[in-house]
Amino acid sequence: MNRRVFLSGVLVIGTTLATGTAMAFDLFKNKDGAGKKADSFPYELTDEQWKQKLTPEEYRVLRKNGTERAGTSPLNNEKREGVFHCAGCDHPLFSSEHKFDSGTGWPSFFKPINDEALGYSSDLVLLVPRTEEHCANCGGHLGHVFDDGPQPTGKRHCINGVALDFKPAQA
């Protein structure tokens, strides 16, 4: 391989990554496909306010679309009845009734608590189309949804544990 072919390949890959990243964050899409700008949510804070409110890891995941290391969340082993809320804005997202062990290292659910809890957008950052999930209230990045989950939905909502706060049910 000569230098010209190598540099052309790097340019194509770099352009694809940049385009995919821009597309992934350009439009926040609701489940019904209706678009909503990513900076327009019921619960909004400035970037500085988010930095003060969240831990550095929560900020990295929720506000900068990061991913926590697999297997590091204590919520992987959470078995009590209760509700998982957005760590950024306290919006209810998932019920413990819908949690399952996917073996992936991240808390996984086969459906959200209701149809209005989450928003969706296209994610092409890894050059493979994925569906990114956001909190519908604050726009915080939660994780991704895949079509390899259990019935009755066949979905696997693979969520960063650091993006969630668990609230046990009252006894």
Image (cartoon, rainbow, N blue to C red):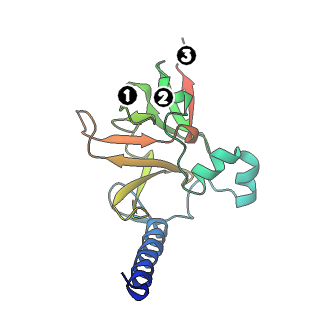
Q: Give the quarter of the figure containing the C terminus.
A: top right
Residue topped by disc 3 = 170
Q: Nearer the viewer, residue 47 or 108?
A: 108
**Residue 66: x and y, percent?**
55, 53
Q: Is residue 75 left or right of residue 144?
A: right
**Among the two numbered marks 2 and 3 on one chain, the one whose residue lies closer to the N terminus:** 2
Mark 3: secondary structure: loop
* Residue drawn at point x = 43 percent, y = 85 percent: 3
For label 1, the SS is loop
Label 1, label 2: how far apart the Cα atoms are: 8 Å
Find residue 1 and report its horizontal and vertical position in percent.
36, 81
Q: Is residue 147 positioned above or below 103 on the image?
A: below
Q: Earlier in the sequence, mark 3 or mark 1?
A: 1
Image height check: is 47 above or below 71? below
- Per the rendering, the mark at residue 111 is none
The residue at 23%/33% (across/down) is: 152
Q: Residue drawn 65% across and 45% down?
A: 57
Amino acid at dot 1 = Asp
Q: Amino acid at mark 3?
A: Gln
Reply above or below: 16 against 75: below
* Residue corresponding to mark 1: 101
Q: Could you say where residue 98 lies in the image, as x and y percent from the top left?
A: 37, 29
Q: Are marks 1 and 2 in contact (CB under 8 Å)?
A: yes
Query: Which residue is labeled 2 in the image?
Result: 76
**Dot placed on the residue nearer the N-terminal end, 1 or 2:** 2
Which amino acid is tagged 2? Asn
Local crowd size for mark 1, using a 10 Å CA cut-off: few (<14), some (14–19), many (≥20):
few
Marks 3 and 1 sit apart, C-alpha to C-alpha, by: 24 Å
Q: Is residue 150 left or right of residue 123?
A: left
